Image (cartoon, helix red, strand yellow):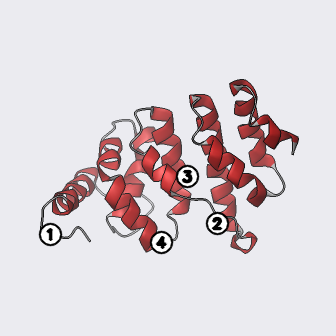
Amino acid sequence: DLLTEVMNNSATQRDLAATVLSYASDKKAVVPYLQAAVLDPDEEVRNNATRSLSLIAAFANQHPELGIEIDAEVFVDMLNSVWFGDRNKASAVLMHLTESRDPTLMQLIRDKALPGLIEMCRWHWRGHSFVPCKLLERAIGLPEQKELHSKNMTIKTALELLRKQNTPGESGQ
């Protein structure tokens, strides 16, 4: 509980606490504190809180019996952030949260983050573009495979879907 109290102190202390909280034995109990820290005004606090939630999301997928729930909406919004770290870490969390292809989450991503994902998928360095491209593939309904589909095909398909969403009388679903 000392660590959760620290989340109200200086940015440096919040930053360290956001990192350490991912090692808590009761991961379900720390999720609300980390979710709040994801909205912190300090970029490093957000970065470490989001990184911690990414680790917890992976753990939650391996242990569904623990009932660990992470709200995905803030991470979908972060895909449109002007800060690289927000976009990068949010895509890592969403990579885990979209493993089940929950239709509601997939629709949320299509509704709010296609332009951001398209831009990120276009990034040249594979280390930065792989996860966003994989999320984009999932969001537009491409079949899952270990390697990426053709970037050009994925982006073209996503742009067509985006055009349909933005055209009156057409449905993007």
Tell me which amino acid carries mark 4.
Asp
Tell me which amino acid carries mark 1.
Glu
**Direction from residue 28 to residue 43 in the image, left or right:** left
Label 4 sits on residue? 102
Check disc 4 and report its element: helix, strand or loop: loop
Mark 4, mark 2: which one is toward the viewer?
4
Label 3 sits on residue? 93
* Mark 3 burial class by Cα count in 10 Å: few <14, some 14-19, many 20+: many
- Quarter of the figure with the C terminus: bottom left
Check disc 1 and report its element: helix, strand or loop: loop
Q: Quick check: 41 above or below 24?
A: above
Check disc 2 and report its element: helix, strand or loop: helix
Cα distance between the residues tagged 1 and 3: 31 Å
Q: Is there a contact, CB below 8 Å, between mark 4 and mark 2?
A: no
Closer-to-camera residue (26/147) = 26
Mark 4, mark 1: which one is toward the viewer?
1
Whole-percent x, y for residue 76 in the image = 45, 52
Whole-percent x, y for residue 87 in the image = 46, 41
Question: Which comes before the other along the chain, label 2 or label 3?
Answer: 2
Label 1 sits on residue? 170
Residue at 16% x, 57% y is 163
Question: Which comes before the other along the chain, label 4 or label 3?
Answer: 3
Label 2 sits on residue? 61
Question: Could one spot residue 138 in this view of the protein?
Answer: no
Cα distance between the residues tagged 1 and 2: 35 Å
**Direction from residue 19 to residue 173 in the image, left or right:** left
Question: Which comes before the other along the chain, label 1 or label 3?
Answer: 3
Residue at 52% x, 58% y is 72
Question: Which comes before the other along the chain, label 1 or label 2?
Answer: 2
